[in-house]
Amino acid sequence: METADQLKETVRQKYGEIAGQSTSTLESQGCCGPTSCCNADVEANVPIAMAEDYQKLNGYVADADLGLGCGLPTQFAQIKPGDIVVDLGSGAGNDCFVARAEAGETGRVIGLDMTPAMIDRARKNAKVRGFKNVEFVYGDIEDMPLPDDLADVVVSNCVMNLVPDKAKAFAETFRILKPGGHFSISDIVLLGDLPEGLRQDAEMYAGCVSGAIQKDAYLKTIADCGFTHIIVQKQREIHIPDAVFMRYLTDNEIAAYRNQDKNHPSFGIFSVTVFAEKPVQSCCGPDCCN
C-alpha cells in the first residue's frame, strides 16, 4: 500500500501530465484523457462522466476547463461582491475565474494547488486575461500556506477525495475561513457497501474513487472539525457503463445496482456538493460578553 507521501506524488505526477496537454487534446481523448486521475476507465477505453458543464456560468474560461471536476461548487457557493475566495486544488484556474466573476473587481480569489505545472498554467490563463485580483499559490491542502481567518468562501471540486488525511484538510479549511464564512465543495463519496469486485478494483478510476470514503463518514469528518449548518446541496449518481461493470460484477450484481430505488439507493458512487459554515465565535464567559 502506498504511503500518504507516495499517493500525493502519484497525483502530482498525473495532474502534471494533464497540465501539459492542450484543451483540445483532452477533449478528443474523452473528457480529461487517459492520463487523468478521473473520468475514464483507460483499460476498457470507456469514458466515465464525472465532470459537469461550466459553459453557462459567468466567468467561464474554456482554456482553464480540463474536465477534472465532479460538480459545480462555485454555482452553489453564494459568493458576494468583495468576497475573498479560496479554491482548493485550483488546477488551471477554472473555478477561480468563475469565482472572480461573482466576487467582482473588489473581491480577491486565491487558487491553491500542489502541482507546479498546474500553477504555471493557471497563472498564464490569468495573465493573458489581465486578471489582477486572482492569484495562484503552491501548497498542500493538509498544510496550507495561508493565514488564519482569511477567506469568506472556500470552494473545491473533486479534490478532497484525493487527499490522504481528510480530517486535516477540513481542519485547515476551517482555520483559513473567517468566522461566519462557509465552503461549498464538490466531491466523490460512496454510499453503502459496494460489490466486492468493484470495491477491490476502484483504481479503474485511477485515484478518484479509490480515495473516496463513505458519505456518512465524509459528513462526520466535516462536523468533527467544527463546521455547522452542513447541507448536501446536490447529489448525483456517477453512471458507470455496463462495459465497465462487466469486468468487475456478475450479471446479478449489475441488475441489482441498476434496479435500486433512485431516491433511496442502497449503494453506489456519487458526486455530492456540500455546504458548511464556520460558526461565529460565541460568548465564552463574563470577560468577553460585556
Image (spheres, grey):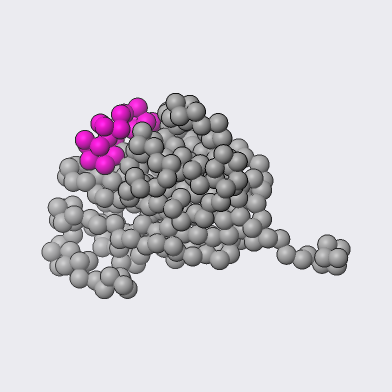
Q: Is residue 110 magenta?
A: no
**Rendering coords of residue 250 (x, y %):** 15, 62
Image coordinates of residue 178 in percent, x first then y, are 65, 51
Residue at 39%, 37% (x, y): give it: 61
Q: Is residue 92 above or below residue 180?
A: above
Q: Is residue 250 visible?
A: yes
Q: Kindly identify the residue that appears in the image at 40 percent across and 51 percent down.
A: 72
Image spot of residue 127 (x, y percent): 48, 26
Magenta highlight range: 15-35
- Image location (x, y in percent) of residue 104: 54, 42
125, 199: nearer the viewer: 125
Res 158 seen here: no
Residue occupying image coordinates x 73% and y 64%: 282
Which residue is rendered at x = 33% and y = 50% of the image?
52
Q: Is residue 281 left or right of residue 69?
A: right
From the viewer's perspective, is 182 left or right of 260? Answer: right
Is residue 17 covered in magenta? yes
Locate residue 246 relative to residue 75 in the image: left or right: left
Q: Quadrant of the N terminus?
A: top left
Number of dots carrying numbers: 0
Q: Between residues 121 and 206, which one lies in front from this camera angle?
A: 121
